Image: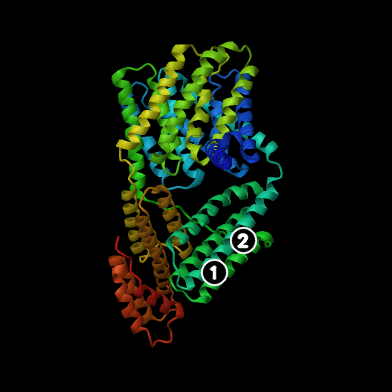
């Protein structure tokens, strides 16, 4: 009996373990759907309702392509109201410019298809290339210009005289979708002004405390590139969020954004000085300056005119490759249409431009394309079920709207799951486009299959071109970024007005972007890259301080000349001129007119060289 009881107990334990593992597996795999958080469920329901509302209004207005309105809702929808406002603003600007450019292209080449598509490809390449220089939704604005130009121009190929009407219709869908999303966001997200203020101040205080604690660790001689990289990532992410929080805070808070960016810039200087063995006085000075800027947000001074500006890192080679890839893709899509005489060719070309633009908004387009493709397949499958079985069975738009809520809410929940965000990206936006609800007709089998094949063909074509035309390789990307850093490190000796804070902010953003884009790189390779980049940031800080000192008119001429000799050598050789810093430091050892900061900068540069790649 005891043996039977023991086996029964073992079976019970194993059954309990199996049940626990099964629950953990289901929670990890499907928790986003069956156990979503209140915030995620609110986002999914709110955005789905806005998409349905825009569709119903577009059908009530008897627009010819009402499905584009809900696509706009899903494009501009984000978890925060400030982010949605920023995205909608740049989408408006991009749509106006892109629509105008589409009209110009059709007017310039009404009968020359070859010249028209060459001009379109060059224009889209320029937009995608220039977008590489920008961050946030400014980049998105240029990408909207590119694919809106293609959609308007290709939509009027068969009837060039209607190009202005096509452009106006496109703008109407954009405005309708954006207004619906913003209206429901106001209802679902009340009291955002105070919440944004509390969130911004809380984040700044939290990250200031983290940096202060990490600076003590660095001053103790314990340097860890991974920890430093995580902290820099947090600083860069916080800098991105500033614009959205200030938009939510409302008018009259413009200076809060400048003060908040100044806080993060000062914290970057704290990390650089602590890592570069700067004096405690300098580190504490930057920490106190950061706290003073936080206080200026809490209690804004009267007649505050403080401004603080930074700019994005500009990798020219990356911009050229992105532009050439996009231009090649458009030319390839046109040639495919030209050779096959595909009736859905114009739709295929416009989908290619749209998918290129949407993927280019992701941080790593090549890494995002597989998920985007899988979401597109799911989108075509669900759209097929609705087009063949659901739409013919309903007699009123209101019933169709209720039935569309089911896949839309599921797609909205998937958009909040990190592993499925790229799948949901394509599923949510193109589902109403493929179903194609309209007052005038419903899609028959042939129309649906033509539209779905053009869409899936565009997604597959784009994925192939991402892998064939200048494919993304993490090791090459790291080498190019390292070469860019070394080049910039030499150039700052010449001048150009770049401040210490701008130098640190640009390099922090560049390093974080590279780390996120190259997640498959071996850990030792990534740590080596991060160490080199962090070293370069510190060396650049000291070079800029020497450059500023050499530009002072009050500095004695002999000291200025020695510093200028060193800066010219640094411009030619980069960190290869570090030995000269030691020589200059020795020559100035007994000169009482030399500021302590100059001595420290020369000593630190003499002892630092970039490790080999």
Q: Residues within 10 Å of mark 2 (few under 14, many from 20)?
A: some
Residue shown at 64% from the left, 33% from the top: 46
Q: Is 122 located above or below residue 363 in the figure?
A: above
- Name the quarter where the N terminus is drawn: top right
Earlier residue among tags 1 and 2? 2
Q: Residues within 10 Å of mark 1 (few under 14, many from 20)?
A: many
Q: Nearer the viewer, residue 213 or 602?
A: 213
Q: Toward which corner of the image does residue 210 lie, by quadrant?
A: bottom right
Report the mark closest to the observer, 1 or 2.
2
Q: Is 475 located above or below residue 126 in the figure?
A: below
Q: Toward which corner of the image does residue 415 lie, by quadrant?
A: top right
Query: Any mark on residue 205, and which?
Result: 2
Q: Toward which corner of the image does residue 24 lie, by quadrant?
A: top right
Residue shown at 53% from the left, 25% from the top: 68
Query: Any mark on residue 286, and which?
Result: 1
Secondary element at tag 1? helix
């Amino acid at each position: 009996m005891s043996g039977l009881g023991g086996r029964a107990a073992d079976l019970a334990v194993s059954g309990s373990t199996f049940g626990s593992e099964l629950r953990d597996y289901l929670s990890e795999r499907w928790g986003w759907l069956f156990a979503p958080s209140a915030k995620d469920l609110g986002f999914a329901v709110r955005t789905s309702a806005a998409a349905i509302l825009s569709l119903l209004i577009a059908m009530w207005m008897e627009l010819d392509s009402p499905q584009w309105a809900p696509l706009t809702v899903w494009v501009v929808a984000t978890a925060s109201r400030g982010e949605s406002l920023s995205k909608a603003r740049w989408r408006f600007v991009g749509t106006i410019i892109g629509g105008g450019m589409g009209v110009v292209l059709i007017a310039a080449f009404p009968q020359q298809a070859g010249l028209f598509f060459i001009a379109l490809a060059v224009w889209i390449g320029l937009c995608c290339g220039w977008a590489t220089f920008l961050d946030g939704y400014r980049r998105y604005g240029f990408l909207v210009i590119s694919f809106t130009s293609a959609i308007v121009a290709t939509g009027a190929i068969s009837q060039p005289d209607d190009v202005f009407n096509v452009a106006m219709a496109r703008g109407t869908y954009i405005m309708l979708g954006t207004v619906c999303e913003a209206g429901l966001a106001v209802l679902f997200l009340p009291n955002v002004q105070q919440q944004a203020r509390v969130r911004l101040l809380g984040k700044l205080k939290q990250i200031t405390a983290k940096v202060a604690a990490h600076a003590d660790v660095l001053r103790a001689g314990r340097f860890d590139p991974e920890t430093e990289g995580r902290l820099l990532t947090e600083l860069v992410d916080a800098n991105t969020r500033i614009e959205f929080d200030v938009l939510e805070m409302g008018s009259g808070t413009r200076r809060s954004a400048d003060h908040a960016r100044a806080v993060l810039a000062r914290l970057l200087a704290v990390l650089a000085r602590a890592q570069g063995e700067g004096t405690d006085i300098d580190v504490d000075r930057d920490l106190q300056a950061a706290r003073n800027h936080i206080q200026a947000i809490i209690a804004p001074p009267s007649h505050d005119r403080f401004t603080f500006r930074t700019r994005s890192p500009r990798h020219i080679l990356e911009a050229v490759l992105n532009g050439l890839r996009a231009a090649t893709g458009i030319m390839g899509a046109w040639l495919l249409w030209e050779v096959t005489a595909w009736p859905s060719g114009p739709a295929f070309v416009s989908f290619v431009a749209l998918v290129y633009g949407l993927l280019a908004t992701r941080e790593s387009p090549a890494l995002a394309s597989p998920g985007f493709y899988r979401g597109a397949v799911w989108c075509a499958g669900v759209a097929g079920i609705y087009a063949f079985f659901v739409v013919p069975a309903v007699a009123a738009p209101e019933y169709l709207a209720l039935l569309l809520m089911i896949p839309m809410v599921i797609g909205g929940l998937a958009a909040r799951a990190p592993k499925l965000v790229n799948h949901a990206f394509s599923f949510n936006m193109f589902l109403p486009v493929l179903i194609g609800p309209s007052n005038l007709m419903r899609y028959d089998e042939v129309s649906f299959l033509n539209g779905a094949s053009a869409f899936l063909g565009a997604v597959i074509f784009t994925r192939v071109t991402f892998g064939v035309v200048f494919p993304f390789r993490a090791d090459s990307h790291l080498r190019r970024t390292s070469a860019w850093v070394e080049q910039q490190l030499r150039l700052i000796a010449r001048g150009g007005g770049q401040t210490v804070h701008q130098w640190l902010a640009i390099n922090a953003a560049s390093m974080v972007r590279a780390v996120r884009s190259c997640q498959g790189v071996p850990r030792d390779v990534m740590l080596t890259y991060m160490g080199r980049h962090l070293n370069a940031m510190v060396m650049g800080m000291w070079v800029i301080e020497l450059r500023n000192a050499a530009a002072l008119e009050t500095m004695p001429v002999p000291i200025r000349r020695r510093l200028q000799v060193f800066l010219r050598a640094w411009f030619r050789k980069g960190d290869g001129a570090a030995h000269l810093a030691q020589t200059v430091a020795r020559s100035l050892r007994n000169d009482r007119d030399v500021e302590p900061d100059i001595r420290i900068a020369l000593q630190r540069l003499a002892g630092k060289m970039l490790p080999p790649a």
